[in-house]
Image (cartoon, coloured by chain):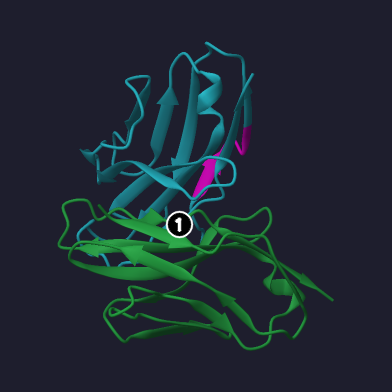
Amino acid sequence: GAGVSQSPRYKVAKRGQDVALRCDPISGHVSLFWYQQALGQGPEFLTYFQNEAQLDKSGLPSDRFFAERPEGSVSTLKIQRTQQEDSAVYLCASSLTRRYEVRETQYFGPGTRLLVL
Amino acid sequence: GNSVTQMEGPVTLSEEAFLTINCTYTATGYPSLFWYVQYPGEGLQLLLKATKADDKGSNKGFEATYRKETTSFHLEKGSVQVSDSAVYFCALSALYSSASKIIFGSGTRLSIRP
């Protein structure tokens, strides 16, 4: 079946522009995570949704970052007034059940590579 | 807090060589441990996992054993292939934690020479 998809795969933005990154999780998956992966580093948690509810946004680096999942399926990560330090790969992952099922596998999308000039 | 430390790369080996990538962790509670792999141009894939002490995860010839006494989860493979060239991430997810997000190490790039 289809995996997690993300679009666009690449995005170049001028400093100060707003960007929107889309994630289509695996159909029926309850949990959705966003991660940020800087060059040469491992992914770092940004935010978590259980269905449409955003239960954890402790990893969002500033109030310029906003995520939503209004119907409990597709999610959008929005970055306002982009800065150069926002340049990274943004990964989306989904899993079948609730977040506390730590044995549940998270399935990752291919990521969106954002470059802010 | 929870953290993962893994061997820095890049690691370059010849085909059929033995592979070890070291990983140690710090965690409160009882974490589950994972190895993820990222092939060029592809997304992160779960390679193997272990959910309690002394469990051995295995997949595609790779193995890792959850060692609570040494807080380690080293990745091993007896005979690597060129197709194993990728970046490998050790990771944990803490059981009974209020933040069961995955914590990743910084990754180890592996290159296999034919």
Is there any visible trace of residue A48 in the rendered image?
yes
Q: Please tell me whether residue A15 is drawn above or below residue A8 in the rendered image.
A: above
The colour applied to the residues of chain B in this rendering is green
Residue found at x 23% / y 56%: A99
Residue A21 horizontal/vertical position (percent): 49, 32
Q: Pointer 1: what residue?
A: B105
Q: Please tell me whether residue A117 is drawn above or below residue A39 in the rendered image.
A: above
Does residue B69 appear left or right of residue A90 in this picture? left
The count of marks equals 1
Amino acid at the residue labelled 1: Gly
Q: Quadrant of residue B68?
A: bottom left
Q: Nearer the viewer, residue B95 or A111?
A: B95
> Which residue is the extreme one toward the right?
B114
Q: Secondary structure at mark 1?
A: loop
Residue found at x 68% / y 57%: B40
Is there any visible trace of residue A27 in the rendered image?
no
Q: Is residue A7 magenta?
A: yes
- Numbered range of the magenta stretch: A5-10
Residue B114 horizontal/vertical position (percent): 84, 76
Chain letter of the residue beneath label 1 in the structure image: B
Residue B94 horizontal/vertical position (percent): 24, 62
Chain that the image shows in cyan = A
- Mark 1 Cα-neighbour bin, 10 Å: few <14, some 14–19, many ≥20: many
Quarter holding the C terminus of chain A? Answer: top right
> Which residue is the extreme one toward the front?
B70
Q: Is residue B78 magenta?
A: no
Does residue A79 appear left or right of residue B99 in this picture? right
Residue B37 horizontal/vertical position (percent): 55, 64
Q: Quadrant of residue B67?
A: bottom left
Q: Please tell me whether residue A93 is drawn above or below residue A112 in the rendered image.
A: below
Q: Magenta part mainly helix, strand or loop?
A: strand
Residue found at x 33% / y 32%: A60
